[in-house]
Amino acid sequence: MGKTVQLEPSPKNHIETLMKVGYSMNMAIGDVVDNSVAAEAKNLWIYSPPSEEPFISITDDGHGMTENELQENMRIGCKNPNDTREKTDLGRFGSGMKTASFSVARKLIVISKKKGHKICCCIYDIDLIIEKDQWLIEKLSEEEIKNIPELDKVFESGHGTQLIWKNIPRYKSNIEEINESALAEDITSMKKYLSIYFHRFMEGRDKVNFFINNEVLQATDPFLTQENGYTEGQSDSQYSPNGKIDIQVHILPHHSKLSIEKIDALGGIDEIAKKQGFYIYRGKRLIVEGGWLGLAKSSQLGKLARIQVDVPTTMDDLLSTDVKKSSFQLPPKIRHLFKRMISSPIEGSKRKYNYRGSQEEANDFWDINDNKREERITYEINATNKQFSDLVNKLKKENRKYLISYLKKLSEHLPINHIFSSMSSKPKNVKQEEIDWAEFERMLREETWK
Ligand SMILES: Nc1ncnc2c1ncn2[C@@H]1O[C@H](COP(=O)(O)OP(=O)(O)OP(=O)(O)O)[C@@H](O)[C@H]1O
Ligand SMILES: [Mg+2]
């Protein structure tokens, strides 16, 4: 073997890379929340008031850390990803708290208190690391901690951990209104994200209360299991020495059965359709929200189909997740199981759509002609309608062709794309029964047609 040389990464270059590992704001918050859940928090408070210098504070009342533990946990790669962890520990890489924070803020303040221990605080300041080209953290004394303006009240009596993200580049445009609206948008998006990605922690006996700017978050069940019209599909389990994967198929109710609030909570009808597919949970925490993982194509008729997959954290070696916990690698053995589960929910979803289609066929004025063999669907005026025959009979034979020609054009010009888009995005606004016929009535009265 040749001579070995130790090559330390350059801290100032390394940190610039870590800031760009690809976390979205929501993913970053999710990684921090993972730590609070793992610390058995009962309450989690996210606080970010509008301000000239916006900051984001995330506090939990979990078991907290001692000064030594905190200092060690500030190290990037503080834990071995191959270590066996508690089942409820959502961590794996020993880096989330740092990498998630660096991708949002240039300053990370972590304050923590464990029961029976004194409060402690460590700070990463990216500008200091770049200036000194060293992995430096700043440690504060108890007195100095008390002077942190954003310090949370939770430490007055109990235990827990607070992260403060300061000096946030995304809120640093020269125009104050842009910064304010960017923060407001992030908060709205964060609420939706957390209420779906952590929905299984927000309910039940051991639930965690989530607060964002003092508003309590409600869980959003992506399968709408409590709504009218929901159908539970088949279930299956796959056993391995490290644990078992549970699979449960869900067919959502058709959107005509849902309230506007429910549709909104799921991001609108288009979003519901886009998010058909697999919902993969790692230790009850959602990692993959929809998509068929290359095993099936998204389709209009499959949009009500969702497959819940529960993978325990003990199976990370088989279904490895990435540092941001935003994807899964599917090994061939598991792909096979997933593929087997797909056909039934897609069929179930199709049935709900076809059923509605046949309901609408029972209409005296329009025929819906669905020719499956030739893969052609046409909407046609019903020529055998009684009112229509009476009208045709009233016309002179030589004039009938004009009416037919007009009706042909009417059918050919049916604004199908617009109807589809409106029914997909705002079905409750489509009110055909409320057409204003005043113009027709006026023309009739004034004998415009002679
Ligand atoms: N809110 C918290 N309460 C108590 N301990 C915490 C908290 N946040 C982090 N820690 C401790 O700090 C350690 C490092 O956290 P970090 O998120 O960087 O890595 P991880 O959770 O171990 O793994 P991953 O990179 O997969 O998130 C955790 O393992 C945990 O022991
Ligand atoms: Mg973590």
Image (spheres, rainbow, N blue to C red):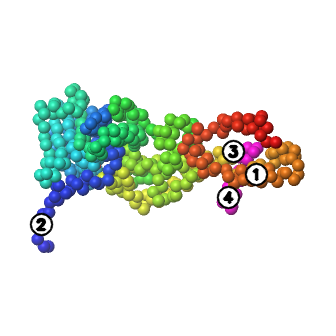
Marks 2 and 1, the one that precedes in the sequence: 2
Q: Quadrant of the C terminus?
A: top right
Check disc 4 and give the amino acid type.
Answer: Arg
Marks 4 and 1, the one that precedes in the sequence: 4
Q: Which mark is residue 376?
A: 4
Q: Which residue is mark 2?
A: 5
Marks 4 and 2, the one that precedes in the sequence: 2
Mark 2: secondary structure: loop
Percent across and percent down for residue 157 are: 22, 26
Mark 4: secondary structure: strand
The quadrant holding residue 193 is: top left
Check disc 3 and give the amino acid type.
Answer: Glu
Q: Nearer the viewer, residue 79 or 99?
A: 99
Q: Which residue is mark 1?
A: 406
Q: Nearer the viewer, residue 412 or 162?
A: 412
Q: Quadrant of the N terminus?
A: bottom left
Mark 1: secondary structure: helix
Is residue 183 visible from the viewing direction of this image?
no
Q: Which residue is mark 3?
A: 360
- Count every numbered label the image shows and give the total: 4
In 3D space, how far apart are the residues under numbered discs 4 and 1 (Cα atoms)?
23 Å
Left or right, 321 with reference to 422: left
Looking at the image, do the residues carrying marks 4 and 1 touch, with CB atoms under 8 Å apart? Answer: no
Q: Seen from this angle, which residue lies furthest bottom?
A: 2
Q: Which residues are magenta?
A: 361-377
Q: Nearer the viewer, mark 3 or mark 1?
A: 1
Check disc 1 and give the amino acid type.
Answer: Tyr
Percent across and percent down for residue 371 are: 70, 57
- Label 3 neighbourhood size at 10 Å, few (<14), some (14-19), many (20+)? few
In 3D space, how far apart are the residues under numbered discs 2 and 1 (Cα atoms)?
86 Å
